[in-house]
Image (cartoon, rainbow, N blue to C red):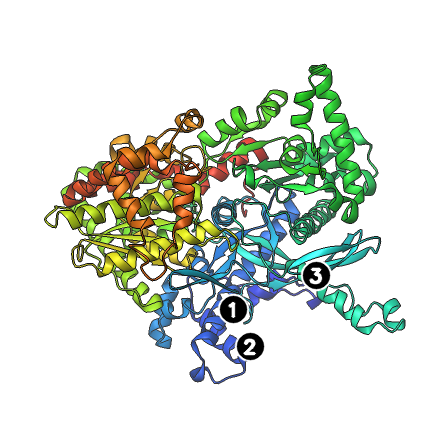
Amino acid sequence: MGKAKPAAAPSAKGPLEILQEYGCGSVPFSGANDALYERRLVFDHVIEPATATPREQFEALSAAVRDVLAQRWVETSRRHDTANPKQVYYLSMEFLIGRSLANNVANLLLSPLGAWFEKSKGVSLARLIEEEPDAGLGNGGLGRLAACCIDSLATLDVPAVGYGLRYDFGIFRQELRDGNQVEQPDPWLTEPDPWEVARPGEQVTVPVGCTFEVRHGDVRVKHAQPMNILGVPYDRPVVGYGGRTINTLRLWRAASPNVFDFGEFSGGDFFGAVGDRVLAESVTRVLYPDDSTARGRSLRFLQEYFLVRCSLDDIVKRFRRRGNDWAALPDKVAIQLNDTHPAMAVPELLRILLDEAGLGWDQAWDLTVRTLAYTNHTLLPEALEKWPVELFEALLPRHLELVYEINRRFLGDVAAKHPGDEGRLARVSLIEEGGARKVRMANLAIVGTHSTNGVAAIHSELLRTATVPDFAEVFPERFNNKTNGVTPRRWLLLANPDLAALLTDAVGPEWVTNLAHLRKADGLADDPAFRAKFLVAKRAAKLRFVDWLKATAGIAVDPDTLFDVQIKRIHEYKRQLLNAIQVVVWYNRLRANPSLAVPPRTVLFAGKAAPAYHLAKVIIKLVAAIGKVVNADPATRGKLRVEFLPNYSCTLAEHLIPAADLSEQISTAGYEASGTSNMKFMMNGALTVGTRDGANIEIAEEAGQENVFMFGLTADQVLGGRGWYNPQWHYENEPETRAALNLIFDNHFCPDEPGAFEAIRETLLGKGDYYMHLADLTEYVETQRGVMALYADRDAWAKKAVHNVARSGKFSSDRTIFEYCRDVWRAGPCRPA
Ligand SMILES: *Cc1c(COP(=O)(O)O)cnc(C)c1O
């Protein structure tokens, strides 16, 4: 790099200077970096480079890329320590990161590496990428949002740290056996992860007010035996696009403070002492696989507290190390709570300020509220976290004391404004009375932070007006909206190289960090040559997906069909069942009228069901069963195909979304907070068929109503219909609805397992069809007719698809993060000089 060797004594050298001497950090990948790869193979693996397995090659290449980014990583953290800017901390129980190698290579602008590697080593980068496990530390949208947000924070050069847990086992791997979901463990760390850096020197002690024992995967409290758990940080680089800023994702692993508790050991209880070690480590053993449900397990409670305690300890240490005064906390620190999972941060920060900093209540409370902010992710009542007071008493008595005092003061304020309004006090109280008393975590999060936001306009509005109107009345200034976004790096640049190249040709490369630039391509929707190029790119993405699917799952699909895609967690409110019934209606139409003119269509489903969510598993089974029958029926061959693709993950989404023609976003209106896959599909030129729910509404506004297919009840109509809606009416009065349902109920799709879909009859007709599938079915089928008619004219389809891509700029997580910075965190970039 032509830099003179520093003359100072070796002890004066920092890591930055040392790395510079090694020539790390030069971009693009050069001869100096070439040596890094060979060295990693020899030094880390001690092998002849020529004998390296693909896994060893993947590890060495990733480690070499890490060597390249190490310089900038160290520089970033030094820059932040020196400038002492306002720092953003993103606390989340989930980070659904996916794979890192290709992402880090692209964000470091090292893409020439691929060609270099293939030429000089004779190995395809695409092959090595398949060696990396998918870091599945999340369930779905909430975890993926966290991953997109930290990507955008780094790209916008905002000083930020993501805090999460380093689960030994991420979200389970889903297998399908005879259409049944089977959960397999995901031991993603059995081989060394080349991206993480363990920092045992920065470990944190987490005191807990009791010991516990593990029973059936849950813990049982053993009272009055306090214990300590250690939190060991593992850092992962978060590479901003262009590589100027490399932020950190810090994941905590639970460990035991010492191998032997000498008290117990000298008492002869060797196994007891070692057993406690295992107990402590079980705190970060496994991610809870529930999406949009709170299951109230005490181990989960411990996990949440562990995340909060470790992260706040770390945040406060960094704040003090930089020489800041306590009063400056909200000027230097912004902490975002991703849902209520880290809401214990409210009493924990208050505890630190009172008990450790020695501040008085009023100042400590003011600083707490002004430092913390909360994002709400769902209005589903079953998702609202409430923890038994009993658990607090046993594990965190001091925190419970603080929660009570917060509540006493808050209820005092409310009572002063609304004398005698006992109903109101009961509704807003942080404590749910009656039966086992519980702490309401959402109420705690709203009262203890200065900002509560929803994740799409309609969701924020419903939150304010329908879910917590009492709080919106007390704190109107706290409620705001931050519509979700997704990172265009992973979801367009990397996932869809052909479309990305076409867009760069059309509008220049700026769209990668400013997605609004895609607007410049909007006029090209009227250019027949551009539409043709768009269709060529779509076909390339389809072929790539078809090959990948064949190779990884052994499933063959025809790229010359309409790819109609619904991929997301399986949940009643997301209405995979509505899609399945619609497919059966078309199946019946095709059987009755073989000459029906419809374009050939492949309906693709993927998604995991929470292991304890019985009906969701039946829905998977139904889709698989419909596929088996429909795909084998000569009447529909070549016209309709249905596949349930196993093990939905980031990697599957990255392959499938670019190939999709149609994006299914058909939740019951008022129930999907935002959705983010809807945004990924739009960017990749799929048209949306959807309900007026979540971000679909904003997608339609941006794309233009004429470029999307919206149907179904509105959120208001769903609420209004609660009193009188009768699914039976649809069954009795709509012949096609009845015929489709009868096929399902009468075992047409499961001749070997009669009654397999009884639970579906029960939910739709027996229990009143809470999610109103049948209310929306006819209009949905009719909308699908319109979809297919348009697809028959590929050029007309392409015009709408191009408009969708060109108008997708709003849905970049860069825009989301910009708004959080401006309105919630009041934080800005800290760039290199
Ligand atoms: C984007 C994404 C989600 C969220 O999908 P929705 O359809 O918005 O619920 C879930 N899982 C994965 C792997 C994703 O990439």
N-term mark: 3 or 1: 1
Name the residue located 52 percent from the left edge and 39 percent from the top edge.
377
Circle 3 or circle 1, nearest the eye: 3
Seen from the viewer's position, the closer of residues 358 and 175 is: 175
**What kind of element bears circle 3?**
strand
Labelled disc at residue 47: none
Q: Mark 3 to mark 1: distance in Å?
A: 37 Å
Q: Nearer the viewer, mark 3 or mark 2?
A: 3
Q: Does any portion of residue 344 appear in the rendered image? A: no
Residue in the picture at 83% in, 67% down: 261
249 over 355 or under it: above or below: below
> Badge 3, how many Cα within 10 Å: few under 14, some, many 20+?
few
Q: Where does residue 24 sit, x and y in percent of width and height?
A: 52, 65
**Label 1 to label 2, Cα distance in Å?**
9 Å
Secondary structure under badge 2?
helix
**Label 3 or label 2, whichever comes before in sequence order:** 2
Locate residue 439, reporting x and y percent: 69, 38
Q: Is residue 363 left or right of residue 659?
A: right
Sequence-first disc among 1 and 2 = 2
Question: Would residue 147 be visible to someone looking at this image?
Answer: yes
Is residue 594 found left or right of 832 in the rendered image? left
Using the image, tell me which numbered label, if any, was put on residue 44. Answer: 2
Q: Which residue is mark 3?
A: 214
Q: Position of residue 771 (x, y in %)?
A: 42, 37
Q: Amino acid at mark 3?
A: Val
Q: Is residue 490 left or right of residue 508?
A: right
Q: Are marks 3 and 1 in contact (CB under 8 Å)?
A: no
User: Dot 2, crowdedness within 10 Å: few (<14), some or many (≥20)?
Assistant: few
Label 1 element class: helix
Residue position for label 1: 63
Q: Nearer the viewer, residue 14 or 331?
A: 331
| Label 1: how many Cα within 10 Å (few below 14, some 14–19, many 20+) | many
